[in-house]
Image (tube, rainbow, N blue to C red):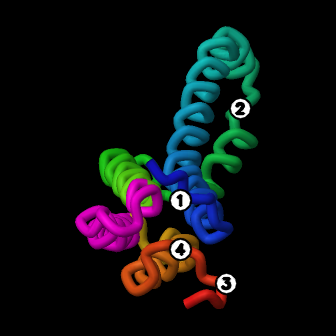
């Protein structure tokens, strides 16, 4: 069995896919944590809010609301869309790694990798598209040169 060397293009593709997955999954995770934090603090502050309300003072948790107001409003509306986009990025990256392991035999994986990356771009929007463009470019270029050794002059 031939052991193929890891090329810089493959490393860049895997890192780019990992950054894309983090870009998709981190905002819902942070927003969910902030919502949980807001609920916990609202329960802890409830007796004091009641007492301050009796005294005529009004208090609210405006600082936490302003932090959450600065986040993207669509983050929690479509969690399945974000999870499916992350899944598409992961499957596209896995197909690329499998295709790089056996450059002569993995025709299906090599052709499926850009399809999954394009699907993730459609689901993720413009921001994710800009992040994944180098990944897509490498995947499309490997259709022509399957060994992913772009810098060698042996051919």
Q: Mark 3 Cα within 10 Å, few/some/many (few <14, many 20+)?
A: few
Upstream in the sequence, badge 3 or badge 1?
1
Report the span colored magenta.
Answer: 98-123
Residue to which mark 3 is pinned: 151
Within the magenta stretch, is there residue 105? yes
Marks 4 and 1: in contact by CB < 8 Å?
Answer: no
Marks 2 and 4: in contact by CB < 8 Å?
Answer: no
Disc 3 and disc 1: Cα gap in Å? 21 Å
Q: Which residue is drawn at 55% across and 90% down?
A: 155
Disc 3 and disc 2: Cα gap in Å? 66 Å
Magenta region, main secondary structure: helix
Outermost residue on the top side: it is 47
- Residue nearest the observer in this picture, 123 or 8: 8
Outermost residue on the left side: it is 108
Q: Mark 2 Cα within 10 Å, few/some/many (few <14, many 20+)?
A: few
Residue 58's label in the rendered image is 2
Which of pointers 1 and 2 indicates the residue nearer the eye?
Answer: 1
Upstream in the sequence, badge 1 or badge 2?
1
Q: Which residue is drawn at 51% across and 77% down?
A: 138
Which structural element holds mark 1?
helix
What x and y, as percent, mark residue 148? 53, 73
Upstream in the sequence, badge 3 or badge 2?
2
What x and y, as percent, mark residue 125? 42, 72
- Residue nearest the observer in this picture, 16 or 145: 145
Marks 1 and 3: in contact by CB < 8 Å?
Answer: no
- What is the quadrant of residue 9 in the picture? bottom right
Residue 148's label in the rendered image is 4
Which structural element holds mark 2?
loop
Upstream in the sequence, badge 1 or badge 4?
1
Which structural element holds mark 3?
loop
Disc 3 and disc 4: Cα gap in Å? 9 Å
Which of pointers 4 and 2 indicates the residue nearer the eye?
Answer: 4
């Amino acid at each position: 069995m031939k052991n193929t060397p890891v090329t810089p293009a493959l490393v860049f593709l895997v890192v780019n896919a990992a950054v894309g997955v983090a870009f998709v999954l981190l905002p819902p995770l942070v927003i969910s944590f902030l919502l949980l934090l807001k609920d916990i603090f609202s329960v802890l502050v409830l007796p004091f809010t009641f007492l301050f309300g009796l005294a005529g003072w009004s208090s609210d948790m405006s600082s936490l609301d302003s932090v959450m107001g600065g986040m993207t409003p669509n983050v929690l509306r479509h969690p399945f869309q974000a999870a499916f986009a992350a899944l598409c990025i992961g499957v596209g990256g896995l197909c690329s790694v499998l295709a790089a392991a056996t450059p002569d035999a993995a025709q299906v994986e090599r052709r499926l990798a850009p399809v999954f990356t394009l699907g993730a771009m459609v689901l993720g929007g413009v921001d994710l598209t800009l992040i994944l463009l180098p990944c897509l470019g490498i995947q499309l270029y490997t259709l022509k040169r399957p060994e992913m050794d772009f810098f060698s002059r042996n051919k």
